[in-house]
Image (spheres, rainbow, N blue to C red):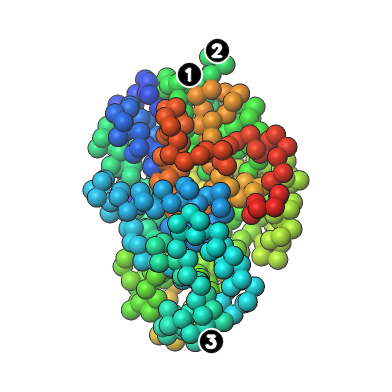
Amino acid sequence: MPAPMRYVQDSTDFPASADVVIIGAGIAGSAAAWELTKQGLKVVVVEKGLVAGEQSSRNWGWCRQQNRDERELPLIIHALQRWGELQEETGEELGFRRTGLVYATRDDSEIAAWDNWGKMAKTYGVRSDILTAEQAKTMTPGSTTLWRGGVSSPTDGHAEPALASAGLAIAAQRRGAQVFQQCAVRGLDIAAGRVSGVWTERGLIKTSRVICAAGAWTSMFCRRHGIDLPLGNVIGTAFRTQPIEQAIGMPLYTPGFACRPQLNGSYTVSISGRGRLEPGAQGIRYARQFYPTFKRRRKNLQLNFGLKSFFNGPEALARWEFDRHSPFESTRILDPAADLNLVREGLNAMRREYPALANIQLAQAWGGMIDSTPDAIPVISTVPKLPGLVLSAGYSGHGFGIGPGAGRLAADLATEATPIVDPAPYRYSRLVDGSDLNAPGMM
């Protein structure tokens, strides 16, 4: 069952041309649309399904600097600044609250890793407070575990996936952007070696600048144009509880569950690091690049082999013409099944940890397909072999919080403006030029 989301009204009068076309209306695409419309550009967002229909409505909703890879810190610092501004700027409720967040554990190695991370992050001006056992207990009132310690990130927060992408898209519409849902982009029109338009199921839109923020579908889309983009797709599970008098007031990580309080008194809950793989042709194609990551995470991944992924969805073998039905129209919204064993495990862990939540009940569970890169760092980049194309994908399970920063960086690259942060860590070329993606310092 899909996660909750706010619905967006389509624009009218399908355009013949645009300054920038954005493929995909998740958080990265919607944030880019907002930033571009502020510049007075004619922006068209084309979405094969619904705004935030896939991973942008199915994530945890955390907006964190804590425990980020160092390469992402400049971008998330900017993103958190934007989260704090966007609600007033757009006039839309995005659900952002700077509540801080807490990690608590009985594992000394986790505490040591958080301590080392905090020393690095301090050089960027990021606050990360290591907690003693007593402090961890104080910051998790009502919990039953005698924690060894933890970490607090008081300047982090959370936003609402059900509202954020839609709010940005609606705000962009008010500034003149056009949004078209249930309208797949089948491919790029190319003239003289550069982008000259996009072919949609409703016809051609002429443009010289395209941002492809198509999530788990991005690799398939690129492959149709001879662009090799190593992405792996992991299916995660999350769920929403019934509203209850809240015992947990901010995002909380524990070894048994991670949760985020919602505005209506319910929680979004998941179990960190757990997921399943259902590889198809794409998974086999990039198996070598992803093997080091798979080896590290193997104990937390369920591996399901079958033929379905070879014929349907973003992992499939597929060929299509731009004037014919495409794979993007065959699957309007990716809606993988939730792992009900993880749901039960998470609910029981919450009930054990917080007796005040003994009567907490499940409201809804869902699966989501997470597009990941081999080094777990997103691609926000131009593509040298195809001028006019900017990729914005591979957010590896932590793209929602970084979304406003990612949208701004993609907008900068599309318009050849001075990038808001150094784009080098997110360059496309690192994935295909032989760079050592598992070198020391890369997580």
The residue positioned 57% from the left and 68% from the top of the image is: 115
Q: Percent x, y for residue 176?
A: 27, 32
3 vs 2, front mark: 3
Instruction: Please name the amino acid that badge 1 sits on.
Output: Ser
Residue on which the image places disc 3 = 146
The residue carrying pointer 1 sits among few (fewer than 14), some (14 to 19) or many (20 or more) residues within 10 Å by Cα, namely: many
Residue on which the image places disc 1 = 196
- State the residue in front, 428 or 125: 125
Q: Percent x, y for residue 396?
A: 57, 51
Sequence-wise, which precedes: disc 3 or disc 2? 3
Sequence-wise, which precedes: disc 1 or disc 3? 3
Q: Is residue 375 left or right of residue 412?
A: right
Please identify the quadrant where the C terminus is shown. Answer: bottom right
The residue positioned 47% from the left and 31% from the top of the image is: 413
Q: Which residue is situated farthest in the front direction here?
A: 123
Q: Is residue 341 left or right of residue 347?
A: right
| Marks 3/2: CA–CA distance | 66 Å
- The label on residue 345 is none
Q: Percent x, y for residue 317?
A: 67, 37
Residue on which the image places disc 2 = 192
| Marks 2/1: CA–CA distance | 9 Å
- What element does badge 2 sit on? loop
| Marks 1/3: CA–CA distance | 61 Å
